[in-house]
Image (cartoon, helix red, strand yellow):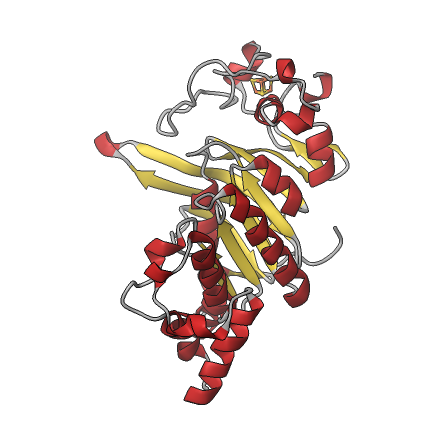
Amino acid sequence: MSKQPLFEIKNLKRYFPAKGGKTVKAVDDVTFDIFPGETFSLVGESGCGKTTCGRTILGVYPKTSGSILYEGQETAEMSKAQLRQFRRRNQMIFQDPYSCLDPRMTIGTIIQEGMNVHFKRTPAERNEKVTELLFKVGLTADFASRFPHELSGGQRQRIGIARALAMEPDFIVCDEPIAALDVSIQAQVINLMIDLQQEMGLTYLFISHDLSMVRHISDRIGVMYLGSLVELSPTAPLYEKPLHPYTQALFSAIPDVHRGKKEQRIRLKGEIPSPINPPSGCKFSSRCPYAQDRCHEEAPALQELEKDHFVACHLAAQL
Ligand code: SF4
């Protein structure tokens, strides 16, 4: 892509202290860009660091080291005023909207809460804005006077989206936004997000373990394993020809990727190792069916094997 990235993430690390003076390397030297108007997705098993990565980019967690450039500016060096704008323009949608909607507040108050801090509007203008946002997310004006417990899971997620949109953002981190919803509702919420993106020019960082849904919404995808990016590619080539053994195993579990040939599913040996004590060399070496001596000694770098398709594996070119 030739556009100027909205975000440039370089060698980002986010470590957490653990018991016994140990360290959890939740995000460990991750580099990627996010371009305006695209959906960039992070996928991987639970605990791979994708949520921590999204939260660190937004500043919810301070980074341990590395660089987060937003429109070319280092976020850690922003002034208070710039940071305030950064927080408004970069929003988050959560997996469980119910846990972040105050049960004592009406939906109208919830949607207004953040926007009243940033935009000067009269009470009538605020109500008008709430109605507009409710329509945008496919709900009616009367939802403004209801309480969260009166809503279904899908409706609550629509409120979570409306609340994010109220801040007039450029960028939204969508952290497993459909994982808590019924399957029948998931596609509706995803389609709403795609429509809003096209209408408002939004950029998404979509975090999910649902590889079928990720395929539907993403322009590019990063695959994470134990805090590291192991593969990075536009969506179509990744699903057609995953290059990393971990991605191959992950994708082989989706029936439609292999046209229903269940016998082609690759079952990984062993459990995912602890990020406190990851294997030396390639972090995937303890589960990789192709691991060789070199893999246990030397960590592979992310390299462009095909156009815009990067992979971190010593043997990827031969597999
Ligand atoms: Fe497997 Fe070695 Fe490639 Fe790691 S570097 S994914 S262990 S083949």
Residue 168 appearing in the image: no
Above or below — where is 206 with respect to 307? Answer: below
Residue 309 at x, y percent in the picture = 71, 35
Disc count in the image?
0
- Most extreme residue toward the left is 20
Above or below — where is 313 with respect to 123? Answer: above
Residue 227 at x, y percent in the picture = 47, 35
Horizontal placement of 13 versus 243: left or right? left
Horizontal placement of 247 versus 120: left or right? right
Question: Can you tell me which quadrant of the image ligand 1 is in?
Answer: top right
Residue 133 at x, y percent in the picture = 52, 72
Residue 100 appearing in the image: yes
Q: Quadrant of residue 71?
A: bottom right
Name the residue at 56% across, 64% down: 138
Name the residue at 45% across, 88% down: 124
Residue 3 at x, y percent in the picture = 73, 57
Depth check, front residue: 10 or 219: 219
Depth check, front residue: 215 or 281: 215
Horizontal placement of 309 versus 100: left or right? right
Depth check, front residue: 96 or 300: 96
- Most extreme residue toward the top is 293
Above or below — where is 298 with respect to 307? Answer: above
Above or below — where is 290 with respect to 194? Answer: above
The C terminus lies in which quarter of the figure? top right
Name the residue at 48% across, 41% down: 50
